[in-house]
Image (tube, rainbow, N blue to C red):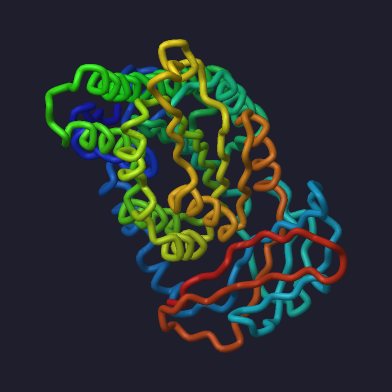
Amino acid sequence: MYGIRSRAFYNKINMRMIKAVLACCLMGILWGNAENAAVMRGHSSKGLIAAHFDQSASQELKHFVSVVNIEVPVRVFKGNKFVDNLSIRDFEVYENGKLQKIEAVYLIKKTSIKKEEAPTKVQLKPEVKKRHFVLIFEMDDYLPELNKVLDYFFTKVLASEDTVWVATPATSIQLKKDMLTQMPREKIAEQLKFRLKKDIRQRTLRLKSLIEDLRWIAETGGWGQESVPGNIAQQIADLKMLDEPRIAEFAGDLKQMEGQKHAFLFYQKEAYRVPTQYIKVLEAHERQDYIDKEKIQRLFTDASTSIHFLFVTKTGADFQDPSYQNPGSSAVYEQGSGDFFNAFREIAVATGGLRESSANPALMFEKAVEAAENYYLLYYKPSDYKADGKYKEIEVRVKGGNYQVTHRAGYFER
């Protein structure tokens, strides 16, 4: 059985949200019994990265030296419907504003190539059966609709060749490749539901405790130290702090994986009722200046990973009970309007993913999955390719019609 790291170890490492959520994709831990260990496994950050580099170092070097064609997943919509009747003549690809020659176009549905056009007879073998899914739950409060998300994923989406990471606010779980032959999908989904609910509830309790501390200080004067509210506000912010180096590491790890890569980020609206006098204290600790949006966008587009940003507008019962609704001395503090929130919306667009907003995460997830499973793969040969390490912007246009086109925004030449 695989080794299990203690919670104390992860609490020490994962003081910020990225170490509990995004970096979880690199640092998983096991569930604590033999049956779960048979289908779930975790990795330390060092082990996972080392494994990828050990296995692919020579392949990556060859890729950097002899790049011929750039792969661009493209999704074309008319209204809310995916357009699946386009040909190679309908597309135009530009790199840094310069028109490029398209070598081949493939229409992909789920894990199958439905149509292929390669007029120059280039030998390309798109890897469409190998898919990597990352489900990231950045939630303060548990919602029953999350059960439907996991049910839908395991019964309607997951294929035998797929790899899966599920990141909760406290842990990360990687599903072993042979899990579907060892346990019914429904049972795997039930175990994940249990773990997800438990981990979100732990965050809920911690957040409520911190808010109650603020209220107690407001009512009693607390310990008479002006710095205490600020320290509490920082702890609230640290519950979901995204750290730029960790995000960059996450993007780099995804880049090493072959096949199609999709990350679904469930991000719940933050709305807490706190003492009015501490609104500005909380605002001073918002996560607005911690992310270089342009840098992170380029890292994920270079990794050819679609990030689907699913903004959950509904909060659960824990923050709606009467004890949190005393308007006489409190006000609703909301985050989500700063650069932090906008960064992930823009990352979704830059990577060709969806950005949705709804009270129902299950409906958003179904829509995002449909977009992820239906797309075109375009290949083009850059007319003036140079391995100079510079970022090249990609633009895909579709001739005629009023279409909505999403695709990766660029790549780094190496």
Quadrant for residue 398, please give it. bottom right
| Residue toward you, 47 or 294 | 294
- Which residue sits at x=34%, y=40%? 280
Residue lying at the far top in this picture: please name it: 322
Q: Position of residue 133 (x, y in %)?
A: 53, 42
Answer above or below: position of 26 versus 332.
below
Position in image of residue 380 (x %, y %):
65, 76
Say which quadrant the N terminus sits in. Answer: top left
User: Is residue 358 found left or right of 44 in the rendered image?
Assistant: right
- What residue sits 46% from the left and 36% below the top? 334
Please, which residue is most extreme toward the front here? 328
For residue 52, above or below residue 365: below
Residue sitting nearer the eye, 138 or 375: 138
Seen from the viewer's position, the closer of residues 380 and 273 is 273
- Residue 288 location, x and y as percent? 39, 51
Residue at the image position 50 percent from the left and 15 percent from the top: 317
The image shows residue 190, relative to residue 337, as above or below, that is above
